[in-house]
């Protein structure tokens, strides 16, 4: 793939989406091998520009990699071999780890195990149903109480008088699946998030197998689960491996469930849902701090991270990367649209700059 030229046309974009950032999202001083810095000393390229009234008032830098159908790197912008925390883009691998550990999940339940769900009623209902099916008390969930991730759903939720809840937290499906396999295997429930727990050791191996590289560091994600650092090349390679995996394997089962039930992976108004629903065979998952990974059904894949963690840049960057891969259509335009307002009217946009 030839190196792209700087874009001369505004790239449409979508409102920002994704995980919330808090002090709990950062590695604690007690995290084993927590990096003092995961950022490259080399200044990464600009991936997106903030344009207001024709004036560029800000820029978002980051790194991006595109793999060809054979898995070879076809495009690399910035530092794509240094480790990053993929955040929730690791969830397909965590779900595959739960399957490898022995839990038999399928359909919407498996999609929810790999989800950063929006906290809509159908998400919360299925989490509660899964907890009941495995005889688990919701109090066993060690993800923090939270509000719905989706802004529209959050307003409705608060208007009803509801309060932050562990079931509502966007990672509750993953935590439910983790607890379920521990209960099934007779593993300790109270320490299911310990990096040395048998389940987490299994997930660690799955991440390394899928990425084709060693985990560089283990930290703590915003939900409290162990978080494995790999490179953007490794992340793209992992997504590619899930799409290309043998039918019936844990990896392929996760990919198939996510693609068949994308609304359970994200929600009704999220880019991952739109992309998996409207581009058949595509696997897509975002992560907090502006991480995104996508694999197309032919084996091509991409992964990127916006360095400053600005999720508002995710849509424009993703749409541009998809365009470079030849993916087009209304869904790409919808994902890429990120307007800026002034006085209640549109006066600019966040657009891709590569």
Image (spheres, rainbow, N blue to C red):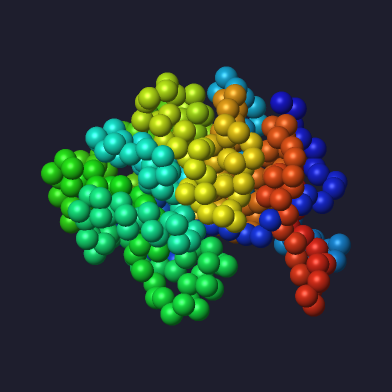
The answer to whether 155 is drawn above or below residue 350 in the figure is: below
Q: Toward which corner of the image does residue 321 lie, by quadrant?
A: top right
**Quadrant location of the N terminus in the rendered image:** top right
Dividing the picture into quarters, in which one does residue 64 lie?
top right
Q: In this view, does 231 lie to the left or right of 208?
A: right
Work out whether residue 140 can be spotted.
yes
x, y (%) of residue 27?
37, 57
Q: Where residue 150 appears, x then y in whole percent?
A: 53, 63
Q: Determine whether, in the image, residue 340 is placed left or right of residue 19.
A: right
x and y percentages locating residue 331 in the rendered image: 70, 45
Nearest the eye: 330 or 4: 330
Residue located 47% across and 49% down the image:
264
Count how many numbered circles sit on residues in the image: 0
Q: Which residue is drawn at 25% across and 55% down?
A: 132
- Observer-nearest of 222 and 139: 139
Q: In which quarter of the image is the C terminus?
A: top right
Residue in the picture at 35% in, 55% down:
127
Residue 164 rendering spot, x and y as whole percentages: 39, 72
Q: In the image, is 67 to the left or to the right of 241?
A: right
* Up/down of 313 relative to 63, above or below: below
């Amino acid at each position: 793939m030839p190196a792209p030229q700087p874009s001369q046309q505004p790239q449409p974009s979508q409102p920002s989406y994704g995980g919330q950032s808090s002090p709990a999202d950062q590695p604690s001083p007690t995290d084993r091998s927590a990096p003092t810095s995961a950022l490259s000393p080399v200044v990464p390229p600009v991936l997106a520009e903030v344009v207001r009234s024709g004036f560029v008032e800000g820029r978002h830098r980051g790194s991006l990699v595109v793999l060809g159908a054979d898995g070879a790197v076809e495009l690399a912008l910035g530092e794509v071999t240094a480790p990053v925390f993929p955040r929730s883009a690791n969830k397909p691998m965590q779900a595959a780890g739960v399957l490898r550990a022995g839990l038999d999940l399928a359909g919407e339940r498996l999609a929810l195990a790999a989800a950063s769900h929006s906290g809509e009623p159908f998400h919360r209902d299925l989490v509660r149903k899964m907890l009941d099916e495995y005889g688990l008390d919701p109090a066993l969930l060690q993800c923090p109480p939270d509000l719905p991730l989706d802004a529209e759903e959050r307003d409705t939720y608060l208007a009803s008088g509801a309060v932050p809840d562990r079931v509502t937290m966007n990672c509750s499906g993953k935590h439910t699946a983790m607890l379920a396999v521990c209960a099934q295997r007779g593993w300790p429930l109270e320490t299911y998030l310990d990096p040395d727990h048998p389940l987490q050791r299994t997930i660690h191996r799955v991440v390394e197998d899928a990425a084709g590289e060693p985990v560089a560091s283990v930290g703590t994600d915003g939900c409290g689960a162990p978080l494995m650092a790999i490179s953007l090349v490794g992340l793209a390679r992992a997504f590619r491996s899930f799409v290309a995996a043998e039918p019936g394997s844990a990896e392929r089962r996760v990919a198939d469930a996510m693609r068949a039930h994308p609304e359970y992976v994200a929600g009704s108004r999220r880019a991952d849902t739109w992309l998996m629903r409207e581009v058949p065979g595509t696997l897509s998952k975002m992560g907090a701090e502006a991480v995104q990974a996508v694999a197309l059904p032919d084996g091509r894949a991409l992964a990127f991270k916006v360095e400053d963690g600005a999720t508002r840049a995710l849509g424009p960057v993703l749409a541009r990367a998809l365009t470079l891969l030849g993916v087009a259509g209304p869904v790409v335009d919808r994902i890429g649209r990120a307007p800026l307002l002034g006085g209640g009217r549109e006066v600019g946009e966040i657009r891709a700059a590569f």
